[in-house]
């Protein structure tokens, strides 16, 4: 099996965490880093165990979409976390805060590397309305290595880092970008380390049972408030103007003078004329 290209030394030199990323599994090729993180959980590996891969062939995004990573170009990373006996931030946020915390951490990480990315609810990062990163959070009750009766969380992150325009599929040419395309020299190792540096304190806040500070920071960091949106939910499409987040991380949309909260779905930005 080929050795991974991921540079452990460069990663560890930038890592400032207590537990996240301190146990690192690096692979050249995997089907899915999330799947490998779940295998690590089954083996009882420690909290904060992180999986990275140079390429993944069956990576997944939300709603079962594929997220494949080209050899050595993008960052495919998954981190294993064990919650307490109650879900993180159960008193003031619940599971809906976890992907938002991960997105906020990644936005802060990229900013530390000189890149300003916008947050798109619930789990994407954009540069100029083009997607540069996506997040997939998965949870299971119990599991080896975690607190008895607690919950095990895997946060998966995919970031387009070194991809050039020539390798972006034609179907995504107008909707996807990478750090390199945007002029950033950031490496996968530095993105990974800075993401974990930013995630660990946010996770600690959620574990304390109050997501309000995390959600407030997410609201402040996002820039699409007042913009027209359409959200495709299992129950149908909800259209209106994005106004904020509720206490659980749901998206508050105003339509016809009333507000509705959407808990999950795929968000699209509407035409400028639809925004107020």
Image: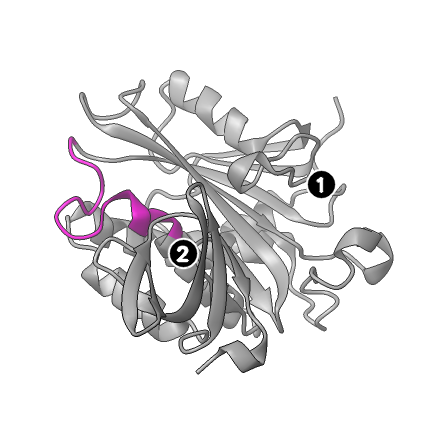
Work out which residue is located at the far left of the displayed protein and give it. 91
Q: Mark 2 points at which residue?
A: 197
| Disc marking residue 5 | 1
Q: Is residue 152 above or below residue 89?
A: above
Identify the residue shown where x is 16% and y is 35%: 86
The magenta stretch is: 85-99
Q: Where is residue 146 in the image (x, y as percent from the top left)?
A: 26, 25
Quadrant location of residue 185? bottom right
Is 234 left, or right, of 273 in this rendering? left
Mark nearer the N terminus (2 vs 1): 1
**Please, what secondary structure does the residue beneath circle 1 have?**
loop
Residue 250 shows in the view: no
**Neighbourhood count class around disc 2 (C-alpha, 10 Å): few under 14, some 14–19, many 20 upward:** many
Dot 2 and dot 1 residues touching (CB under 8 Å): no
Q: Quadrant of the N terminus?
A: top right
Identify the residue shown where x is 58% and y is 55%: 133
Q: Where is residue 184 in the image (x, y as percent from the top left)?
A: 68, 70
Identify the residue shown where x is 46% and y is 74%: 224
Quadrant location of residue 108? bottom left
Between 276 and 161, the one nearer to me in the picture:
276
């Amino acid at each position: 099996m080929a050795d991974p290209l991921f540079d452990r030394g460069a990663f560890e030199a930038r890592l400032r965490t207590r537990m996240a990323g301190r146990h690192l599994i690096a692979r050249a090729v995997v089907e899915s880093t999330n799947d490998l993180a779940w295998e690590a959980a089954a083996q009882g590996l420690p909290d904060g165990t992180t999986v990275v891969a140079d390429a993944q062939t069956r990576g997944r995004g939300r709603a079962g979409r594929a997220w494949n990573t080209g050899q050595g170009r993008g960052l495919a990373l998954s981190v294993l976390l064990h919650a307490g006996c109650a879900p993180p931030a159960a008193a003031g946020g619940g599971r809906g805060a976890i992907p938002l915390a991960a997105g906020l951490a990644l936005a802060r990480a990229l900013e530390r590397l000189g890149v300003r990315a916008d947050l798109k609810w619930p789990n994407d990062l954009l540069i100029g309305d083009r997607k540069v990163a996506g997040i997939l959070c998965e949870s299971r009750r119990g599991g080896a290595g975690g607190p008895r009766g607690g919950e095990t969380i895997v946060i998966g992150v995919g970031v387009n880092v070194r991809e050039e325009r020539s390798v972006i599929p034609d179907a995504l040419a107008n909707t996807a970008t990478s750090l390199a395309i945007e002029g950033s020299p950031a490496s996968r190792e530095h993105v990974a380390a800075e993401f974990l540096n930013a995630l660990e304190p946010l996770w600690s806040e959620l574990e304390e049972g109050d997501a309000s500070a995390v959600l407030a920071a997410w609201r402040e960091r996002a820039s699409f408030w007042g913009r027209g949106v359409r959200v495709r939910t299992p129950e149908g499409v909800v259209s209106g103007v994005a106004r904020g987040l509720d206490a659980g991380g749901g998206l508050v949309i105003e339509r016809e003078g009333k507000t509705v909260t959407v808990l999950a779905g795929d968000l699209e930005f509407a035409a400028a004329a639809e925004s107020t």
